[in-house]
Amino acid sequence: MKKPTFSAALPSKDREYPRYQAYSLHNFRKIPQLKRLSEEQIFDIEVVGNVFPFKTNNYVVDELINWDEVPHDPIFVLTFPQKEMLQPHHYREMAKILRSGADPEKINRAANRIRAQLNPHPAGQMEHNVPELEGRKLTGIQHKYRETVLFFPNQGQTCHAYCTFCFRWPQFVGIDEWKFAMKETDLLVEYLRRHPEASDVLFTGGDPLIMSPRLLAGYLEALLEADLPNLQNIRLGTKALGYWPYKFFADPGAEELLALFEKVARSGKHLAIMAHFSHYRELSTPAVRKAIRKIKQTGAEIRTQSPVLRHINADAQTWAKMWKEQVRLGCIPYYMFVVRDTGAQHYFGVPLVEAWHIFRKAYQMVSGISRTARGPSMSCGPGKVQVLGVSEVNEEKVMVLRMLQGRNPAWVNRPFFAQYDPEAIWLDDLQPAFGKERFFFEEEFPLPRARKFRHGAASLKSAEAAKTLS
């Protein structure tokens, strides 16, 4: 990979670090490196970028993407919309509208029709996860698991760049009724006060670290001042380390942000930075390594997670190398997820059996201190379901699964069995083993066996096969 240059990013000769520059549909053609792409490839980005959210920045463009490998570079696929992310009929519909010169309102209406068919809120997020307080729906809070409350700060519902696979894509497409967000910290505090079983708050989005240190402090200090005895752990879900590590040492307010982390850590609460890294290249720059050191010095811990993604990291060597580097830098591997049943699942998804083989082989390539990662795990309706492997019971080949986390705490750590299916890509695709009609948890939470959202491409085994969709 060529050494990146910052000539396009630096605003002046006397600035040591680049200033943040976002690129989206309205200005991405100004990216100098796009001269390497054909006009057809650029048009594909526009077509897909009118359906799925698209945003990148100069750090990703100049320091992470290897433009000699584009369009197959994993970071390029991770951040730039790909033609095959849309089903062929959806692509043709949007391409036709754009070529016709339609006005923005017509384009947006067409995009919304397509979006509505992509299961925008999987796993019952809207129906089952949003709690109430005195009859008021708390649309900026989700409480699915007993111990953990998710909070969506209003000012944190964007990111430094958008991942193409992101299951929270509805947060960013401008449809208010699809969006989770709240700015009333007092409601969060009161909800936690009335739910002493909750020990963890996870700030999510979007990305809470898109906020200024002052805004973030308003939320975190309110939790500290409330002195809730049940609150033990504060988590910040973020991609900032991967997409804009300058946030932690070069941007205005960097020292203030680190001081805030230190204040939380010294308060007696555990502060966990839940960092999203999908490829080891995101750990390779001097900027991210310096940012990790700075965070670690505050007393915060960094835990890492990502889905296993076709076209980006769907091989054991990539995961093993990523876990090793994370541990070397002082981070804790946490989860390998499975791509959720929303958006472009057909393009990024890996069949469950294949994901297990990747996880198992990667585990075999690392030492014990890298084996803190759990997976492959589906964050589905009833809970987090881990694929433990494939086995044979009474001469029947079965898939062995385990409920890592559940809506009902009694389900946690309970194993169960499904019929062997090498093409299944999600829990809803599986059938119970041994002639049973339902899985054990379906008495309380039935699965949608005939779900409307099915792309029908779950068994794709390679990038070449995926391209035949178009």
Image: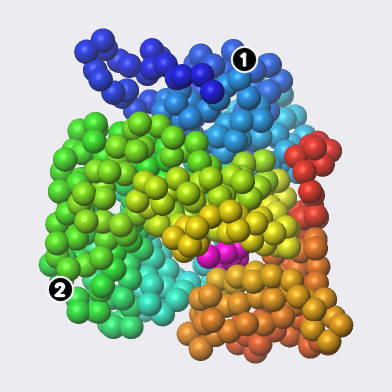
Q: Which residues are magenta?
A: 373-381
Residue 36's tag is 1
Is 453 situated above or below 382?
A: above
Is 5 situated above or below 354?
A: above
Question: Which of the two discs, 1 and 2, labels the residue nearer the N terminus?
Answer: 1
| Numbered circles on residues, count | 2
Amino acid type at image mark 1: Arg
Is 59 situated above or below 148?
A: above
Q: Is residue 278 visible?
A: no
Q: Badge 2: few (under 14), some or many (20 or more) residues near its Cα, within 10 Å?
A: few
Residue at 75%, 29% in the rendered image = 96
Is 246 situated above or below 258?
A: above
Image color mode? rainbow
The foreground one among 172 and 59 is: 59
Judged from the image, the secondary structure of the residue bearing numbered disc 1 is helix
Q: Is residue 202 left or right of residue 452?
A: left
Residue 139 picture location, percent across and down = 40, 64
Residue that numbered label 2 is attached to? 227
Residue at 59%, 44% in the rendered image = 318
**Quarter containing the N terminus:** top right
Residue at 38%, 25% in the rendered image = 21
